[in-house]
Amino acid sequence: MTDRALSVVRAGALTTVQDRGRPGHAHLGVPRSGALDQPAAGLANRLVGNRPEAAVLETTLNGCAVRPRSTVTVAVTGAPCRVTMDGRAVAWGAPVRVPAGALLEVGAAVLGVRSYVAVSGGVTVEPVLGSRSTDLLSRLGPPPLSDGAVLPLGRPEEPHTHVDVGPQPAPPAELVLRVTPGPRDDWFTPEAVRAFTTRTFRVSSASNRIGLRTEGPALERARSGELPSEGMVLGAVQVPPDGRPVVFLADHPTTGGYPVIGVVRTADLPAAAQAVPGTPVRFVAVRRR
Amino acid sequence: MKALPVGDNALLVEVASGEEAQALHAELVRRRAEGSLTVREIVPAARTVLLDGLTDPARLASELAAAEVPPEPPRAGNVIELPVRYDGPDLADVAALWGVREAEVARIHASTEFRVAFCGFAPGFGYLAGLPSRYDVPRRATPRTAVPAGSVGLAGPYTGVYPRSSPGGWQLIGTTDAVLWDHARVPAALLSPGTRVRFVATGPERTS
């Protein structure tokens, strides 16, 4: 192992390596994966001068702690949290120089769910099908971080000349997701279709990188029987037999046999990735563009 | 042929049968290769083909709605041969469902040419079509919590091979040593939609 590496001191509840994912392999049963909050991951990379495709760390709720073996620049974005270096508070959402051997601690999310930690040079674990992302559904890519793990880092890009402090949206108090209806809205009763876009749901604690699960009114089907398996897209709102809508996120299965009542606009999914359990969710029907 | 819009950039094209879905998939892959279709993902399934990452789905939808389902695709490409020992724990149950002796299950299965209708469930897991519909079998009433990698199973009209150990409810009739998925290999997936497949029986006496 070269000195360009990151030691994991505290892995946190669930910290994974993520980049822009591996789209283009759905026909082989390979999910796209990738950072759930792509704008936040992209901003973190820009802040440390990385290329947009560099791999970052995605934390879940309670952060993580790492110790670089060489001096690096780090930026933490996404869910706001306390960031410290050797116990002293440093900036969140801005580049921070971390000397070799210093302990960088990413604290618990104050708001939101997922913080992103970009390190200059990027995390350079071996890519799988062109991506370094951890895919929790099909177990492709590196395993989630564990205490004591060591992650290789790439060579930093040429020093960047300007500091890019991008605006970051605050995690939503209420999650409003724009949906286009179908393709299987005809599998539901008119009452269920109406309830879907008029009632308020809540983010379930069973949500994960595969899907944002909801609690709330159960959507009743108009027909019985099974839908033959069909291809699924990012943002598809699938309704399993319990009637509780699930919004498919990056690690979603590529095919599925439950009807999709609507599809959430991709632009609204980063906010979905930051909605803590209990957050009210409304689905708003929009016209297809 | 019905093209249902899915979100803003995708279409789900629905046809009447699995054979039509395979034919449509082959045609769409051909069109992408020749450059007349720009799309990120072409995902075939049981009765549909999903096209994701389209720039003008509405135009393609109206074009497809007016089109005929293409005829059955030519049997192009090599046949992948999968060596199999017909020693699965559900062989007797399948024999009973088919109304034949166990050896006959192996004979029928190994004399069928399959085609990968679609993939899903796990990377490298193909749904292989080819058995006549009288050999359709239900899934097991209680799925197994762990099916070993290489298990060859039947469910509905399909045969499948588990690329790695996972829970599963298919009726297991045999075992193969073929490596279905190896992400360090190019291509990683041994089977992809459209691949022709034959199972070649290897008796237990011939395995080391």
Image (tube, rainbow, N blue to C red):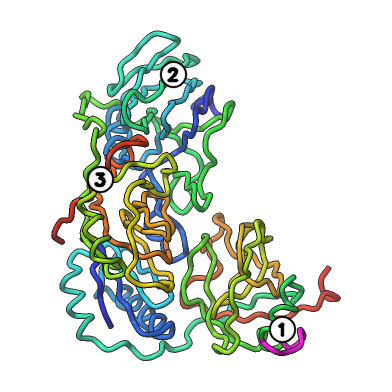
| Vertical relation: B184 (above or below) B26 | above
Please report contact status of discs 2 and 3: CB closer than 8 Å, yes or no.
no
Residue at numbered disc 3: A200
Q: Dot 3 falls on which chain?
A: A
Which range of residues does the magenta coloring cover?
Answer: B98-106
Q: Is residue B97 left or right of residue B191?
A: right
Q: Are marks 1 and 2 on the same chain?
A: no
1 vs 2, front mark: 1
Q: Dot 1 falls on which chain?
A: B
Mark 1 Cα shell of 10 Å, populated few (<14), some (14-19), many (≥20): some
Report the disc number at residue B169.
Answer: none
Residue at numbered disc 1: B95
Residue at numbered disc 2: A105
Which quarter of the picture shows residue B44?
bottom left
Mark 3 Cα shell of 10 Å, populated few (<14), some (14-19), many (≥20): some
Q: Main secondary structure of the magenta part?
A: helix
